[in-house]
Image (tube, coloured by chain):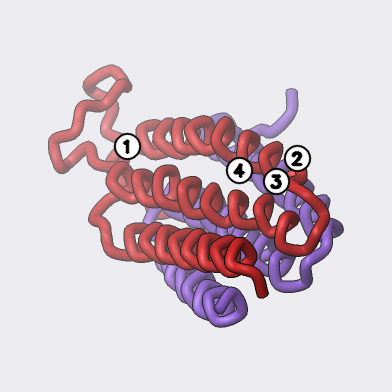
């Protein structure tokens, strides 16, 4: 039962990632692309969480934490660059 | 399998399916809504809710595998819930800064007389 639900959820999250990827490629503005990248890392977090439930061990959640933190840092850096053409002063 | 184990597995399956559906809704919203300000709704609400459901399922799956409920997942969920509004705010600021939606009649924070227009990224 849980395995079937996991397979369906894998398919749903992957479909969502494909749609976000289409938005990332089509734009049309820079803010759309930043939003798409932000959504993409949240979806990657969802995918690795599913993998962690599937495998049934603790190791994946360290990876999830790192993806979440670096993804957020990347979004902030990208937005800062789009706002004032510099990331760090 | 005991009745309690069956109940736990059903709860996990429902949480996993709900999380997947919410994440799918965020993807549909990102691709179907009309402009950036509308598209911001989808990932900041649906995706955090979906990942929240998945992380709750992951935390409870420790019970099913005999590890007990772990704390890591709640940490990740808390982090995502704190950062999602911040990144949405930054995306909105970038959109306003680049004048997205000016011609559709949305208010612009920039002083008038500066023709920015929609900027092809």
3 or 1: tag closer to the N-terminus? 3
Give how far apart the Cα atoms at labels 3 and 1 are: 39 Å
Say few, some or many: other residues with alpha carbon within 10 Å of mark 2 (under 14 / 14 to 19 / 20 or more).
few
Q: Secondary structure at mark 1?
A: loop
Say few, some or many: other residues with alpha carbon within 10 Å of mark 4 (under 14 / 14 to 19 / 20 or more).
many
Q: Same chain for marks 3 and 4? A: no
Chain letter for mark 1: B
Q: Residue at x 26, y 33 (%)?
A: B115
Q: Which residue is the site of mark 1?
A: B99
Give how far apart the Cα atoms at labels 2 and 4 are: 26 Å
Q: Which residue is the site of mark 4?
A: A75
Residue A73 visible in this rendered orientation of the protein = no
Chain drawn purple, letter? A
Tell me if residue B1 comes above or below residue A37 in the rendering: below
Q: Secondary structure at mark 3?
A: helix
Q: Same chain for marks 4 and 1? A: no
Say few, some or many: other residues with alpha carbon within 10 Å of mark 3 (under 14 / 14 to 19 / 20 or more).
many
Q: Residue at x 71, y 62 (%)?
A: B64
Q: Which residue is the site of mark 2?
A: B71
Left or right, B27 with respect to B13, comes to left
Chain letter for mark 3: B
Viewer-side label of 3, 1:
3
Instruction: Give how far across and how far down residue B77 sits, in percent.
Output: 62, 41
Tell me if residue A65 comes above or below residue B106 in the rendering: below
Where is the N terminus of chain A found, in terms of image quarters?
bottom right
Q: Which residue is the site of mark 3?
A: B73
Give how far apart the Cα atoms at labels 2 and 3 are: 6 Å
Chain letter for mark 2: B
């Amino acid at each position: 039962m849980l395995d079937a639900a996991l397979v369906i959820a894998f398919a749903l999250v992957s479909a969502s990632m494909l749609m976000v990827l289409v938005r990332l490629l089509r734009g049309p503005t820079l803010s759309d692309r930043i939003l798409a990248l932000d959504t993409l890392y949240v979806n990657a977090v969802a995918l690795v969480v599913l993998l962690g439930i599937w495998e049934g061990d603790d190791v994946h959640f360290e990876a999830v934490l790192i993806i979440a933190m670096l993804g957020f840092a990347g979004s902030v850096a990208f937005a800062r660059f789009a706002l004032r053409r510099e990331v760090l002063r | 399998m005991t009745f309690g184990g069956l109940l736990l597995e059903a709860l996990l399956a429902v949480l996993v399916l709900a999380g997947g559906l919410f994440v799918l809704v965020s993807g549909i919203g990102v691709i179907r809504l009309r402009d950036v300000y509308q598209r911001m709704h989808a990932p900041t609400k649906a995706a955090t809710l979906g990942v929240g459901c998945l992380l709750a399922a992951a935390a409870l799956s420790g019970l099913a595998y005999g590890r007990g409920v772990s704390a890591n997942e709640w940490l990740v969920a808390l982090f995502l819930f704190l950062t999602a509004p911040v990144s949405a705010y930054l995306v909105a600021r970038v959109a306003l800064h680049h004048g997205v939606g000016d011609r559709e009649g949305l208010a612009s924070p920039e002083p008038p007389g500066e023709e920015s227009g929609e900027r092809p990224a």
